[in-house]
Image (cartoon, rainbow, N blue to C red):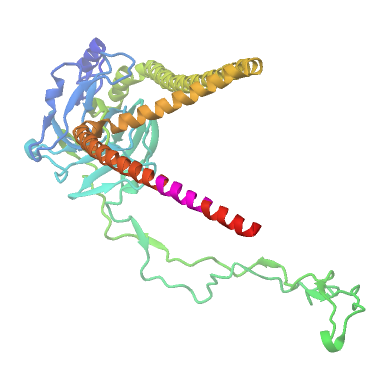
């Protein structure tokens, strides 16, 4: 973020009333992004850019360094105005982070690097003095890193400070005091504080158990509770049995001991049973607790004036992120917490209310867009369903129209049949003639069908038919000649037969006359 002239005035006072500023970057200038130099240690680094994000309180004031590519490593450094050795001084590192992308896995911490760093070789293995800032991956693996280097070893704070994982801008402050105490703040509220040597186990313990001590012989370290020796069991205490035969049960009348065995009453809980008796417990008057050796000063402990003393020359961003969108802004390194507080108010706190409102507007607009898309999809579904129903109704209408046409045809045929029947009743001859015509037409149609089927072969057979006809004609002439000759012969034979029959008849008459004359004599 940036805040124009107000910050200029603050910076002017930095080296007097407020202490000294060693690094301050609000990304207020268009070329401020160039102050962060990409490492040459690897070629697949993600790109960075200046951006206020998708929502902001004030666009000009909200511009910061944004991580712009998904699933990438980032390794960038920026040099301090002057090296900062924190011995005898307070040390404050402060910056803001906005996880605009609704972070699922990604860091947003800074590394404070020694002046001896080669920026071209900066990578995850480079030595650093302090690493501070939020780191989130999933719902459980999230913390604010506060790692300090001591004797070339990186040491994490023993307590887990939870980061802010929403999509608003939050301010992180790590204040290491010259008296070897510290504070970790988020949004100007203290999250953790105490002594450096208590929260970072880098020095030997001041006191240790006396290695020469032994537990006294009369030391009672247990048990803490004992049975009351004066407690007695009551005379009416029934501690058994827990179950008894049911006194109200009776042997069934049809029970056969020989067949069913000996009958036994079912078992029920003993109503007088109170359980096993135990005496009440009282504190053991001789119990002294678990024994431990008394503490003595650790002869190996030695206070180190160089504890939490850092020598810083560069600010580095060395992170991996799954989703891009994280915005770093208002990076400050100073030796004065008052200046840091004033700087934070001018660059962050004064704008948060407006940013929250802007975020709500964006959320409402997004919710409205999602709702409109949902309603549009529902409308499309309803329109499609309505069109399908309309098509189905039209199809049913066509079928009904077809059925109606068919019914009309049947009715028309019935009317025709009725008229024909009336005409037949009044004029049988006309009906006969009509039927004969129908049959003739049917025969004609059949003949036409046959002629049509034979048309293909008729032409081929025409010549052969003509030849056969001529042959038959010739044969008929020959047969006629033969028949004429046969007829003449038959006529001659018939004539001769008639003459012979006549002669035979005359002979019979003469014989008859002769016989009749003999009879008369």
One can see residue 410 in this view: no
Which of 376 and 407 lies nearest the eye of the viewer?
Answer: 407
In the foreground, 415 or 289? 415
Instruction: Name above or below for residue 8 compared with residue 162.
Output: above
Answer with left or right where residue 379 lies relative to residue 411: left
Seen at 68% across and 67% down, the residue is 281
Number of labels in the image equals 0
Q: Is residue 113 above or below residue 357?
A: below
Give the x, y percent position of residue 149. Answer: 21, 45
Depth check, front residue: 361 or 519: 519
Magenta range is: 499-509
- Going by the picture, which residue comes out furthest to the bottom? 258
Q: What residue is at 37 percent from the left and 33 percent from the top? A: 165
| Foreground of the two, 254 or 414 | 414
The C terminus is located in which quarter? bottom right
Which residue is situated farthest in the front direction here? 521
Does any portion of residue 438 appear in the rendered image?
Answer: yes
Q: Position of residue 496 (x, y in %)?
A: 37, 46
Tell me: residue 415, above or below residue 310. Answer: above
Percent position of residue 131, x then y = 24, 40
Q: Is residue 439 magenta?
A: no
Q: Is residue 37 left or right of residue 342?
A: left
**SS majority, magenta:** helix
Left or right: 266, with 46 as reference point: right
Residue 185, position as x, y percentages in the image? 36, 32
For the N terminus, the quadrant is top left
Instruction: Give the quadrant of residue 294.
Output: bottom left
């Amino acid at each position: 973020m940036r805040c124009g002239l107000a910050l200029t005035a603050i910076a002017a006072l930095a080296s007097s009333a407020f202490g000294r500023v060693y690094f301050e970057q609000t990304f207020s200038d268009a070329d401020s992004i160039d102050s962060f130099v990409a490492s040459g240690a690897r070629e697949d680094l993600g790109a960075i850019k200046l951006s206020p994000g998708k929502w902001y309180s004030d666009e000009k004031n909200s511009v910061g360094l944004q991580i712009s590519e998904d699933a990438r490593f980032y390794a960038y450094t920026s040099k301090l105005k002057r090296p900062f050795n924190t011995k005898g001084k307070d040390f404050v590192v402060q910056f803001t982070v906005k996880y605009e992308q609704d972070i699922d896995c990604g860091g947003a911490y800074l590394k404070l690097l020694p002046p001896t760093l080669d920026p071209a070789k900066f990578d995850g293995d480079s030595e650093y003095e302090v690493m501070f800032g939020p780191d989130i991956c999933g719902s459980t693996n999230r913390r604010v890193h506060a790692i300090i280097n001591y004797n070339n070893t990186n040491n994490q704070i023993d307590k887990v400070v939870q980061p802010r994982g929403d999509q608003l801008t939050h301010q992180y402050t790590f204040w290491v005091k010259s008296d070897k105490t510290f504070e970790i703040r988020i949004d100007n509220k203290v999250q953790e504080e105490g002594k450096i040597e208590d929260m970072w186990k880098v020095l030997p313990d001041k006191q240790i158990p006396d290695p020469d001590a032994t537990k006294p012989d009369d030391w009672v370290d247990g048990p803490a509770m004992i049975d009351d020796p004066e407690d007695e069991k009551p005379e009416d205490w029934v501690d058994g049995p827990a179950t008894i035969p049911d006194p109200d049960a009776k042997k069934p009348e049809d029970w056969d001991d020989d067949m069913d065995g000996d009958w036994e009453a079912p078992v029920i809980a003993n109503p007088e049973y109170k359980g096993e008796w135990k005496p009440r417990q009282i504190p053991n008057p001789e119990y002294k607790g678990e024994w431990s050796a008394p503490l003595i000063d650790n002869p190996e402990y030695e206070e180190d004036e160089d504890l939490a003393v850092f020598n810083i020359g560069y600010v580095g961003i060395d992170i991996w992120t799954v989703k891009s969108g994280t915005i770093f802004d208002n990076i400050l390194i100073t030796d004065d917490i008052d200046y840091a507080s004033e700087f934070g108010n001018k660059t962050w706190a004064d704008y948060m209310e407006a940013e929250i409102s802007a975020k709500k507007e964006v959320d409402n607009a997004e919710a409205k867009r999602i709702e409109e898309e949902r309603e549009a999809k529902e409308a499309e579904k309803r329109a499609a369903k309505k069109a399908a129903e309309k098509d189905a109704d039209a199809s049913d209408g066509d079928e009904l129209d077809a059925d109606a046409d068919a019914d009309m045809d049947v009715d028309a045929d019935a009317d025709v049949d009725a008229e024909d029947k009336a005409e037949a009743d009044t004029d049988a001859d006309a009906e006969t003639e009509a039927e004969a015509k129908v049959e003739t037409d049917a025969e004609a149609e059949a003949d036409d069908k046959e002629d049509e089927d034979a048309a293909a072969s008729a032409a081929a057979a025409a010549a052969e038919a003509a030849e056969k006809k001529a042959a038959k004609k010739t044969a008929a002439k020959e047969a006629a000649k033969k028949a004429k000759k046969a007829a003449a012969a038959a006529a001659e034979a018939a004539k001769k037969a008639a003459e012979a029959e006549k002669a035979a008849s005359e002979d019979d008459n003469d014989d008859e006359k002769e016989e009749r004359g003999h009879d008369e004599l």
